[in-house]
Image (cartoon, helix red, strand yellow):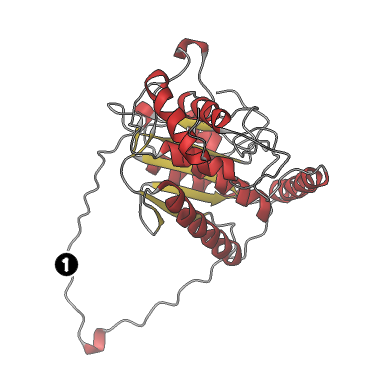
Amino acid sequence: MTPRHKKTRNRRLGAVLSLGASVVLSGCLALAPGPKDTPRPTPRPEKPIYTPSVEAQALTKYYADLEQDLLTRGLLRTDGGGPETPYDAEDLAENFETLAFYDEYATASDGGAGGLGRWEQPVRLVPVFGPSVSAAQAKRDRATLAAYAARLARITGHPVTVGASGNFTVIFAGIDDADYVESKVRQLLPNLSASDVALFATPPRKFYCLVFAGGPQRDPLNYSRGVALIRAEQSELMRDSCIHEEIAQGLGLRNDSPRARPSIFNDDDEFARLTSHDEKLLQILYDSRLRVAMSADEARPTVARIAQEIMGDLSL
């Protein structure tokens, strides 16, 4: 897995997932104490005040400076595209094939295009926060994630919700939370390699966020588990950008393309949030006329037809 100077990493889990674990708890009963034996309540220890490490402070400054530089250059747009970013049904269909059937981190031995991957079961997002994340930031990020989940559900017609338990965990954590992240990822993905666990726990600073999503070994394209990391040192807009891209890639648009525009699935950071073009890509991905594990060749005529319908161009 080669580090790249970009904000995301996406990879299908395949054999990584192990979904059959169970936990057995045991203990013993104790007699209730009598009136005279009732213990006094133990005071709850106060949560220690978090003081960012030197490394965390440096990362916070690095991401703040980076965001300002991108904004100064007219990047991280939030307008969703305009007249200067036109696309038609053919563009949409071609971009969909590149983003949905090719793996961003595939090697030459992987043989090019793979099958279509997506969730057949409802997606239940679970936000969790490292000890370094303040209550105010956690509240704001949880609300952002909930609003985005509702938007994705409307776009795709597929159930996407946020709750306390689920199958797609979104970890908001900083570099000082490395032990927390490592423990959480090992719990969620017990078969993940040590190097990939380390990538989650202590990612290079040029990885703003990352996601792993996929299904069990016997059915890897039928997604059943997702885990994303959003680096907490980033300012709000860059965290929003990470949320938008990582969750969307975790839904099945697993690649990036320099030709996709206007799009967040592009390494140039031009757009910070899901665009009108990206909404249409997700709409195609979850159209009932497509099926999990469909090849690009099998899907191409149907994708072209769906793209024409979405764009209102049925003359092609």
Disc 1 residue crowd, few under 14, some 14–19, many 20+, Cα 10 Å: few
Going by the image, does 120 lie left or right of 29?
Answer: right
Q: Tell how many labels.
A: 1
Where residue 120 appears, x then y in whole percent? 31, 40
Quadrant in the picture for residue 121? top left
Residue drawn at x 44%, y 77% as measured from the top left? 43
Residue wearing tag 1: 29
Q: Residue at x 46, y 49 (%)?
A: 155
Which residue is at a point 71% across and 47% down the rendered structure image? 77
Report helix, strand or loop for mark 1. loop
Instruction: Locate residue 92, reporting x and y percent.
Output: 55, 32
Which residue occupies the foreground of this view, 47 or 36?
47
Up/down of 239 relative to 42, above or below:
above
299, above or below 159, in the image:
above
- Determine if residue 113 is in view: yes
Look at label 1 and name its amino acid. Answer: Leu
Whole-percent x, y for residue 117 in the image: 39, 31
Is any part of residue 230 visible from this angle? no
